[in-house]
Image: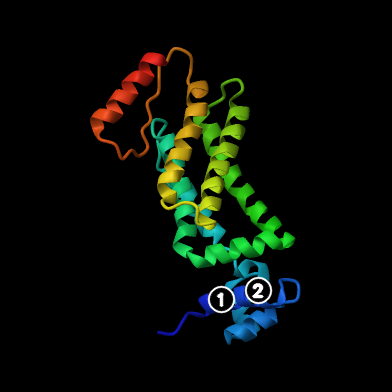
Amino acid sequence: MTTPARERLVDAAFDLFDERGFEQTTADDIADRAGVGRTTLFRHYRSKEDVIFPDHDRLLAAVKERLATSSADTALVAVTDAVRLVLLRYVEEGDRARRRYRITSRVAALRDREIASVARYQRLFREFIAEWMGPAPGAALRAELMAAAVVSAHNHVLRRWLRRDAEDPAAELDAAMAQVVSLFTRQAEPAGTGSTVLVLHDARDPETVAAVVRDALRQA
């Protein structure tokens, strides 16, 4: 089966960045290595930097769509599901994601591009969380802090997976997000509403989980 031009361009870019360096590689070089014309490259990508990055526009749209399906009661679960969508996209890439990590770690221009992309996700989560929290005093700051924590949790687990330190990145992300939620849930509740119980995923048997929840409620 013939590899699509879009995929050949990605492989060519990674190979050339490794062989020659990012600055020494041109868009024409990438097109030539992939066996396509310059016009084909720019039909798929806006620049040589874009070639090696995931389709963040599509990922952001998927995140936004997942958040939009939530209600006030399921907002935090939606945030966790949305973050998992992003993580699993990188995991599905496999070695390509790890090659990108190595390249962006040594090329400042690509690292800056990655940081800018992360900021787009953080802004989307901040706006969603702020809307969920409503106009309560201090809610804007809590939304900003929680969005930063959400992105930090994702990036921590992603880096562990990229370095081959995480055998089950999805489970690690769920655990990390549970910590994020525990930091902010109580502060986000209106006074007098009681305790919030949120179980994202748990491999333990239901009786064990129920016992943990009962203990947490007694301490709340």
Please name the residue shown 55% across and 58% down the image: 57
Going by the picture, which residue comes out furthest to the top? Answer: 192
The residue sitting at 61% across, 50% down in the picture is: 118
**Few, some or many residues within 10 Å of mark 1 (<14, 14–19, 20+):** some
- What SS does tag 1 mark? helix
Per the image, the residue denoted by label 2 is 18
Q: Where is residue 138 in the image (x, y as percent from the top left)?
A: 61, 23
Residue 201 x %, y %: 35, 39
What kind of residue is marked 1?
A: Asp
Mark yes or no: residue 129 visible. Answer: yes
* CA distance separating discs 1 and 2: 11 Å
- N-terminal of the two: label 1 or label 2? 1
Q: Can residue 54 be seen in this view?
A: no
Image quadrant where one finds the N terminus: bottom left
Q: In this view, does 19 lie to the left or right of 126?
A: right
> Residue 193 placed where, x, y %?
42, 16
Tell me if 102 is positioned left or right of 90 in this view: right
Q: How many dots with numbers?
A: 2
- The quadrant of the image that shows the C terminus is top left
Q: Mark 1 points at which residue?
A: 11
- Residue displayed at 50% across by 57% down: 164
Examine the image and state in which quarter residue 146 appears.
top right
Residue 21's quadrant in the figure? bottom right
Looking at the image, is mark 1 or mark 2 nearer the viewer? 2
Residue type at numbered disc 2: Asp
**Image height check: is 155 above or below 212?**
below
